[in-house]
């Protein structure tokens, strides 16, 4: 091989090509190449200023100074352009390379002609020039953008490292094989390890050692394969000491440029407290807070479980509706605190009377529901129900009182009486009312020929739920007169004419409304209509008439009764002094209600307070002095049986005398004859109400009656 053939990147060209073509000016080609380089080619002296002996045109683009400024001039030199802070470092680096006889490479900063600071990379070596002097030859290029990028990268890495190491959230990188590549201190502490290194060294099989539930790691990996990420992946995991906690993982796959999976990267949050809070909420949503029993929300799931068990094992499911007899009497007389303690005792007895796989739930108030898996004869099921009834009937001691309660039980069987919860509850409820109608403390099974009264009650309850919205609840008014027969006020009374059943007696629908809670809506409806109507009476006559409205004890439960009544009065434009509120004795004796405070708030509005049906309940003379009362209403049962010298007559005189001594207005209800009116006036009663004066009338009829009574007198229109 000759010398020419050994040169790299040289293509052999036939000799005639050189003869035929023009000769290449290699000096010119070299000069153009050097000047077009993105940087400066240079030769400089090894002196204090690195004096330039040659520099390419690229120096102008790099520094703003041209070759003429560097060569043969003191205007510019590498030493002067180099940032003062970098000069010694640059010189030391170059001189060390010269001493070692090697090439050098050094990065430093220069200040350009326009004052801009740049980073440059200088690479070079020492050579001998034409005169044998040692000089430097090299190349300087602009690396400002690269340095800035590296700096940004370093800053980003520092920030990430700071976040990674100092984050309160656990952060990890793990391999598909189940090893941790990196974890932060938060995750190590969460899992009970003293350091990230300790966790990585110990926990080398994530799938089998971390998760409590088998298969969770596989599910984690499946979700990432399908979606490239997982979000809030909740699992129970083991800590180092064997205890457990709940975590939520959010992670994604990190892949190589060719798509190969490198590792999983994500965060871990300790959600143990949130999980416990959620479980508490779920428990509270499905359990009765007083008794701890499942509530009506849990019945659907419990019934489905029992039905599935019956399909597997055979047999039937019995749903029993248990209602405590006379509970309301105890609740009204001893107060709700005592009633609550009684309910807790009964709940415990029901649980003890049944098997572990049966369900006892509190449906509401004094009602319980039993779900029983029944295999065998009906007699065996009846024996279970009899045991339940006996447990309930045992005496309960509460606050020094020995309480005796019984229960009525209605039973529906699945699948013959229905397979869904709503149907079974409805049928069991119907059977329970059939048991009550037979004398209480009994049980009854649902059938299509059940007691017609129980079926009718259920139908009435359903119709009553829609009565207000259908405009079926009317307000009738019955006048009250004074001793001379002058009209003083009217009592507002609810009347229901059902589109399905026609007129329904208050003695029938009011107890249903009380039992179901519909009495609240009915009372508010009656109150609003009564106040608006009474406001109209005031505009039609010189003296205002009052209107009396019965309030259900249920309205006192919210503690906001006074504000609700004030809003109704304001809307109707009726002065508070024109409203009388009638209350039951049971309400006044209910220790579970802040009766004193709420009655004082009502008195503060300016209205009058009456005790309705006085003498028929659990009368206690003490409450007459404790509460800010204005009116006593003698129950019509006493009035109806008045005969001179009878017990009723004696009681009426005693009540009237008591009322006068306490400064109360005494009202006699149920006055139906002139003789009764005469006796009651003589006995000391102040106001009178009954059929002798007028029956309850619709609003329009009451207005007409009032106009006639004002013109002709009450006696003329009775």
Image (cartoon, rainbow, N blue to C red):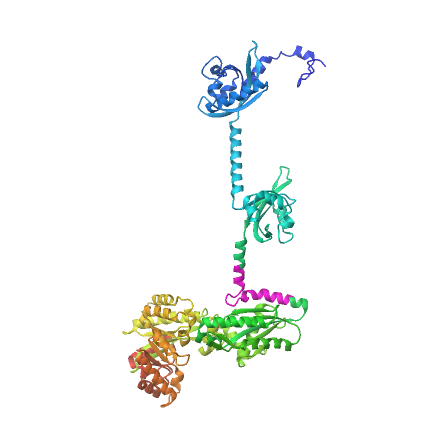
Residue 324 percent location from the top left of the image:
52, 75
Span of residues in magenta? 280-308
- In front: 127, or 690? 127
Residue furthest to the left: 542
Q: Which quadrant of the structure image shows residue 483?
A: bottom left
Is residue 97 in view? Answer: yes
The single residue placed furthest to the right in the displayed view is 1
- Position of 177 with respect to 525 (left or right) is right
Can residue 481 be seen from the camera position used here? no
Residue 254 colored in magenta in the image: no
The image position of residue 100, as x and y in percent, is 58, 19
As displayed, is residue 57 above or below residue 695? above
Q: Nearer the viewer, residue 552 or 181?
A: 181
Q: Is residue 234 left or right of residue 478?
A: right
The mark tally for this picture is 0
Residue at point 61%, 13% (across, down): 24
């Amino acid at each position: 091989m000759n010398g020419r053939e050994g040169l790299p990147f040289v293509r052999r060209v036939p000799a005639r090509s050189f003869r035929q073509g023009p000769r290449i000016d290699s000096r010119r080609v070299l000069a153009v190449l050097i000047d077009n380089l993105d940087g400066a080619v240079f030769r400089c002296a090894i002196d204090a200023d690195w004096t330039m002996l040659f520099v390419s045109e690229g120096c102008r683009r790099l520094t703003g100074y041209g070759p003429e400024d560097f060569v043969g001039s003191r205007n510019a030199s590498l030493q002067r352009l180099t940032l003062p802070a970098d000069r010694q470092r640059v010189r030391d680096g170059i001189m060390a390379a010269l001493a070692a006889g090697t090439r050098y490479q050094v990065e430093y900063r220069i200040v350009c002609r326009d004052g801009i600071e740049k980073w440059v990379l200088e690479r070079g070596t020492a050579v001998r020039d034409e005169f044998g002097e040692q000089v430097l030859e090299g190349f300087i290029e602009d690396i400002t953008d690269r340095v800035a990028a590296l700096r940004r990268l370093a800053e980003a890495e520092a920030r990430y490292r700071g976040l990674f190491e100092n984050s309160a959230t656990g952060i990890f990188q793990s391999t598909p094989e189940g090893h941790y590549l990196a974890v932060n201190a938060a995750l190590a502490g969460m899992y009970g390890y003293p350091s990230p290194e300790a966790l990585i060294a110990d926990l080398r099989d994530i799938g089998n050692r971390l998760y409590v539930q088998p298969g969770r790691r596989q599910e984690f990996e499946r979700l990432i394969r399908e979606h490239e990420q997982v979000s809030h992946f909740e699992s129970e995991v083991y800590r180092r000491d064997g205890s457990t906690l709940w975590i939520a993982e959010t992670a994604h796959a990190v892949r190589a440029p060719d798509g190969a999976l490198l590792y999983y990267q994500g965060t871990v949050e300790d959600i143990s407290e949130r999980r416990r809070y959620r479980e508490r909420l779920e428990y509270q949503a499905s359990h009765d807070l007083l008794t701890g029993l499942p509530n009506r929300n849990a019945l659907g799931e419990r019934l489905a479980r029992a039905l599935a068990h019956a399909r597997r094992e055979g047999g039937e499911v019995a749903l029993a509706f248990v209602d405590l007899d006379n509970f309301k009497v105890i609740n009204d007389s001893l107060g709700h605190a005592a009633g609550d303690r009684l309910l807790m005792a009964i709940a415990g007895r029901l649980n003890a009377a049944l098997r572990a796989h049966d369900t006892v739930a509190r449906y509401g108030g004094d009602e319980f529901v039993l779900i029983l898996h029944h295999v065998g004869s009906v007699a065996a099921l009846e024996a279970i129900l009899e045991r339940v009834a006996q447990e309930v009937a045992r005496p309960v001691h509460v606050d020094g009182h020995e309480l005796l309660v019984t229960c009525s039980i209605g039973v529906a069987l699945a699948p013959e009486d229905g397979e869904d919860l709503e149907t079974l509850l409805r049928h069991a409820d119907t059977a329970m009312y059939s048991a009550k109608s037979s004398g209480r403390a009994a049980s009854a099974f649902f059938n299509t020929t059940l007691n017609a009264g129980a079926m009718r009650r259920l139908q009435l309850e359903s119709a009553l739920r829609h009565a207000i919205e259908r405009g079926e609840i009317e307000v009738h008014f019955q006048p009250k007169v004074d001793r001379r027969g002058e009209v003083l006020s009217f009592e507002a009374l609810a009347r229901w004419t059902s589109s399905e059943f026609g007129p329904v007696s208050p003695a029938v629908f009011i107890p249903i409304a009380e039992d179901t809670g519909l009495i609240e809506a009915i009372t508010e409806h009656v109150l609003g209509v009564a106040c608006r109507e009474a406001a109209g009476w005031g505009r039609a006559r010189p003296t205002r008439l009052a209107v009396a409205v019965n309030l259900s004890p249920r309205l006192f439960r919210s503690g906001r009764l006074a504000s609700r009544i004030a809003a109704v009065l304001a809307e109707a434009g009726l002065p508070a002094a024109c409203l009388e509120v009638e209350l039951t004795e049971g309400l006044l004796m209910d220790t579970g209600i802040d009766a004193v405070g709420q009655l004082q708030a009502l008195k503060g509005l300016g209205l009058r307070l009456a005790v309705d049906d006085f003498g028929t309940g659990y009368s206690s003379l003490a409450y007459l002095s404790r509460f800010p009362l204005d009116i006593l209403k003698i129950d019509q049962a006493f009035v109806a049986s008045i005969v001179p010298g009878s017990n009723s007559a004696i009681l009426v005189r005693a009540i009237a005398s008591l009322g006068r001594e306490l400064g109360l207005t005494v009202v006699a209800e149920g006055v139906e004859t002139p003789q009764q009116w005469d006796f009651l006036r003589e006995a000391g009663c102040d106001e009178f109400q009954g059929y002798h004066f007028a029956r309850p009338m619709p609003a329009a009829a009451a207005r007409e009656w009032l106009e006639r009574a004002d013109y002709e007198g009450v006696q003329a229109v009775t």
